[in-house]
Image (cartoon, rainbow, N blue to C red):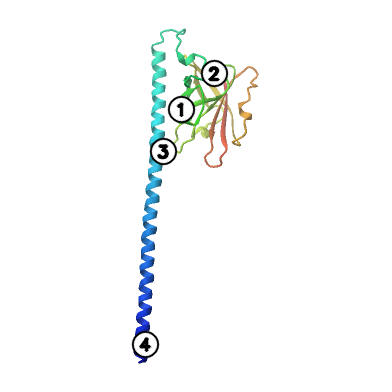
Amino acid sequence: MNQILFSKFNQEIEREENKKKRRILIISKYQFIISVLIIIVCSAYYLYNLYTTKKKESLSKQLLSNYNINLLYSGNSNYETNISKNQNEDEDPFIIGLIEIKKLNIIYPILSDVSDDLLKIAACRFYGPLPNEIGNLCIAAHNYHDYRFFSRINLLEIGDSIIIYDALGNPLEYSVTNKYTIDAYDNSCINQDTNGKKQITLLTCNNVSGSRTVVKATAIS
């Protein structure tokens, strides 16, 4: 009798253990499916962002090509196009010049205005005068992980060369005079008190600390 009861008890325990194993197996399957879905969604989001940023950069190259074509067909220094006109609030942003940093092997158009969408296309005038005029031209651009736009300006050193082209293609060389990091809400770097000098300020976000990297340069007269 005891042996029968003991056998039934063991069978009951075995059934409970099997139920637990099945529950654990089901939970594991659900966890695996959820993990796969999360990976798929994250991968799709990453690829979409990569596609959109690459598409925006291709637009930047197209703008650069259009700028060069405008200069090619200008024929003389008095040539005027919409890139050199004053912008009204109702007009679309246009190219006001180029920025070239040979040390970083980059050259990008400078757009006349700044916004989240425009920053995905090219460098943008954040504040200050037009290129190569007296004052402090502040130029902002994104910091991407694949080294596009201003992602490597932290590698610039004192004395490095930056070339700014105006709307008519006239170049002016600037020499880096300072490089530092500021808080995201610090706007002191856009100060226009340059004592009659032509200066540029490059700004980009620091993706690690949430601060901004600032590079200052002055025109070589």
- The mark closer to the camera, 3 or 2, is 3
The vertical placement of 154 against 198, above or below, is: below
Dot 1 or dot 3: first in sequence order is 3
Give whichever of 194, 45 is nearer the camera. 45
Of the 4 image quadrants, the one containing the C terminus is top right
- The mark closer to the camera, 1 or 3, is 3
Location of mark 4 (residue) = 5
Location of mark 1 (residue) = 122
Element on which disc 3 rests: helix
> Who's the residue at 40% across and 14% down the image?
70
The label number, if any, that marks residue 174 in the structure image: none
Q: Position of residue 77 (x, y in %)?
A: 46, 8
Location of mark 2 (residue) = 130
> Who's the residue at 47% across and 28% down the image?
118
- The mark closer to the camera, 4 or 1, is 4
Dot 3 or dot 2: first in sequence order is 3
Give the mark count: 4
